[in-house]
Amino acid sequence: MRKKPGNDVYVALIVAVVQVVLSQGAAWGQRGYREPLDSLAYVLLLVGPVAILARRKFPVISTVVTLLATYAFVVGGYPYGPVFLAPIFMLWSLILGGRRLIAWILSGVTLAVFVIYASLGGDHGLWAFHTLAITAFILLFMVIGELVRIRSERRAEHQRVVEEESRRQASEERLTMAQELHDVLAHNISLIHVQASTALHLMDEQPEQARTALTTIKSASKEVLGEMRSVLNVLREGAPRSPTAGLDRLDELVTRSGLDVTLKHVGSRPLPPQLERAAYRIIQEALTNAARHAPGSRVTVRLEYGTSELGVLISDTGATKPAVLAEAGSGNGIPGMRERASALGGTLTAGPVGNGFQVEAKLPFPEETS
């Protein structure tokens, strides 16, 4: 039984009271057929409850002792009834404790003992039937014990599956956070680097443009700190997760990029957070690549809200200035964008178009469930 050790004392006390008190009533009801209770009978009635206290350390031995006391009580001619409570509990404990074979062997031995007792003339007629009925009652509780065990195992298996699924989701969440941090850091640090290089180059000749670049650096550094706090807050227990980026912040992203960007929206509709975040990050990475490899270019960002998918197109006209960070970066930008699209069941293509470069993603809307 899945109980705390301290509960065994209460169980033993309850079983002892039930067996002793109710056996007195059974003795009164069976007077003339069974022997009245005497000192030996009371001792045998208390053997089972005492054995309950030792069932965790000696489960098989305590069950055997309980059954032997029960056999002696019945063979001694004492009244039927409450004496069977302790052996039922002990056999049930064996089943729930994983000792099913031993429990069924002992129940078979119990059946054999009662059948032999009845056949040898210990009881006749109704009493023989009564003996077999009591045995059937014990077997019924054995079956109930098996059903409880099966249900308990299924519950444990379900709990294990739930915990594994929770760990899997936690692992996926960590990967998502890592990707979020990568995208945030890559974009903002690249932007800071580009603007810092611009500021250094123009500081003497065009101080106003240098001031603009420094303002962009300040904004980008504040942005990266805010994004990191938003993502890392997920690690705090009970901290609610909110999308760290969405298309409502697209104008801010374009302003910070330092590029000549034209935004086009074709249609409009609400988007699920994961799709909106993926679209934002794809645009962010494409603008980062344009700032690295095509400074001075004109960039067009087009969002097309179709009936079944969101189309995202980012294209630039090619560099008109030397690329400050042309060789910088991890080389994971385009594969990362493609992974984001694939995770939603979409596609992403990227490659040169004329003098410039183009990134096109198709992100399907999730199917609505009724």
Image (cartoon, grey):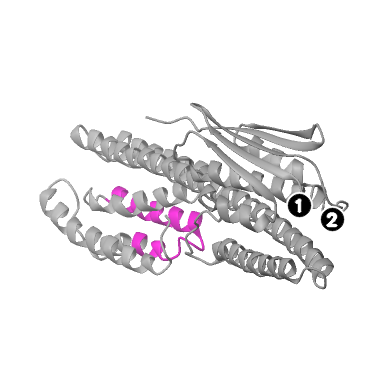
Task: Looking at the picture, tell me which residue is in the foreground, 304 or 227.
Answer: 304
Q: Secondary structure at mark 2?
A: loop
Q: Residues within 10 Å of mark 2 (few under 14, many from 20)?
A: some
Residue 68 visible at all: yes
Q: Is residue 70 magenta?
A: yes
**Residue 334, image x, y percentages:** 75, 42
Q: Secondary structure at mark 1?
A: helix
**Residue 336, image x, y percentages:** 72, 44
Rounded to the nearest angstrom, the CA distance separating label 2 from label 1 is 8 Å
**Residue on which disc 1 sits:** 291
Looking at the picture, does residue 57 appear above or below residue 262?
A: below
In the image, the segment drawn in magenta is 48-76
Q: Quadrant of the C terminus?
A: top left
Q: Quadrant of the N terminus?
A: bottom left
**Residue 201, image x, y percentages:** 84, 66
**Left or right, residue 188 beside residue 79:** right
**Left or right, residue 323 beside residue 219:** right
CB contact under 8 Å: marks 2 and 1: yes
**Residue 318, image x, y percentages:** 80, 41
Residue 73 visible at all: no
Taking the view exactly as shown, the residue that stands out farthest to the front is 205
**Left or right, residue 320 beside residue 161:** right
**Residue on which disc 2 sits:** 325
**Prevailing secondary structure class for the magenta stretch in the rendered image:** helix
- Under mark 1, the amino acid is Ala
Residue shown at 60% from the left, 64% from the top: 232
